[in-house]
Amino acid sequence: MIKGYDKKSVGIEKPFTQLFLLGIMILLVIFLSIKSPYFLTWNNLRNILDHTSTQLIMAIGMTFVISSGGIDLSVGSIVALTGICIGLMLKGGVSVVLSSIIGVLIGGILGAINGVIISKLKIAPFIVTIGSMSLFRGISLVITEGMPIYGFPPQITYFGKGDLGKINPPIILGIFMAILSVFLLKYTKWGQYSLALGGNEEALRRVGVSVNFYKTTIYIFSGLMAGLAGLIYISRLNAAEPNAGFMLESDIIAAVILGGTSMKGGKASIGGTVIACLLLGVVRNGLTLLSISSYYQQLFIGAIIIISVSISEIRQRRQIQI
């Protein structure tokens, strides 16, 4: 533990929030299974996991950003711009593998731009990333003139729609990134410093840690995760859309906060993020199966988020007071 920290205010979020969300999800699964004969079919469950995996990958990156006391509102725009870059390289004759790797790395570069400006110029993350959100989206629209890019080699679709047995590659990637992130958070200096940045950045600076370096790398990681999501999007659609990922950042941030990561920084839960993404995926899928209007879907999801986060925040305050 770094000198100057309150042990109650910094660390891995305890399992209360995860268990609470898991309980809600189990009740929802039981309810939806009774109401719809299609809910528990493998095709439907795979559809939930497949669509949730993309948001989960992005939410993992956002978990580190928010736990460090920051925010990244540009991830949706990074999804679009990395997809456009991959599409342009494919149209230019670059191989699928090389285009995919470079596209994901471009996501990391865009994240680095955010991180450097935030850390070096000491500008609030909200201001920087809301600006880059517009900037990156604007670049995507200017490059494509607002039109999607088509005509890619068929191999690109495997990454988003291919089969590995009975599951799709994005599901495998989501599981892998979740496991990797748990390891990074619990057992690496980088993960511990991410939490420490959100708990007490000044104390971290006083013990000689390069705060600017670690803060920048956290945004690079978030950009890489958004770049991966951009690759999945273009693979699923077999098209690069300049409007891909529009307003996706709101869902990602909601899942991270719902999962128990503190908006104030210093506390994080990868497990909570995973469960929250699954819960929101189940809610959306179930309401669609029940033919409930998308207006009510937003209402229900918003209510779940507010109630769950309120309970978590009240509990955290009580723990600090004890």
Image: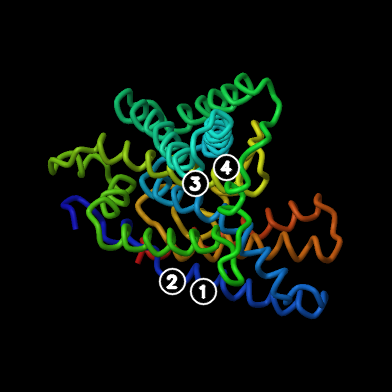
Q: Is residue 14 toward the left or the right of residue 291 in the image? A: left
Callout 1: SS: helix
Mark 1 → mark 2, Cα distance in angstroms: 6 Å
Q: Is residue 163 left or right of residue 34?
A: left
Q: Amino acid at mark 2?
A: Pro
Q: CA distance from mark 3 to mark 1?
A: 29 Å
Which residue corresponds to mark 3? 228
Q: Marks 3 and 4, Cα distance to the nearest angstrom?
A: 15 Å
* 3D distance between C-alphas at marks 3 and 2: 28 Å
Q: CA distance from mark 4 to mark 1?
A: 25 Å
N-terminal-most mark, 4 or 1:
1
Q: Nearer the viewer, residue 143 or 53?
A: 143
Type of the residue with mark 1 = Leu
Q: Secondary structure at mark 4?
A: helix
In this rendering, the answer to whether 289 lies above or below 203 is below
The earlier-in-sequence mark between 3 and 4 is: 3
Instruction: Please name the residue that numbered disc 4 is placed on.
Output: 249
Q: Position of residue 187 (x, y in %)?
A: 26, 62
Q: Are marks 4 and 1 in contact (CB under 8 Å)?
A: no
Residue 19: mark in rendering: 1
Question: What residue would you read off at disc 2?
Answer: 15
Image location (x, y in percent) of residue 304 = 65, 60
Q: Position of residue 15 (x, y in %)?
A: 44, 71
Amino acid type at mark 3? Leu
Q: Residue at x 45, y 41 (%)?
A: 104
SS type, badge 2: loop
Q: Quadrant of the N terminus?
A: bottom left
Q: Residues within 10 Å of mark 3 (few under 14, many from 20)?
A: many
- Expressed as whole percent of the image width and height from the top left, the position of residue 231 reads 54, 44
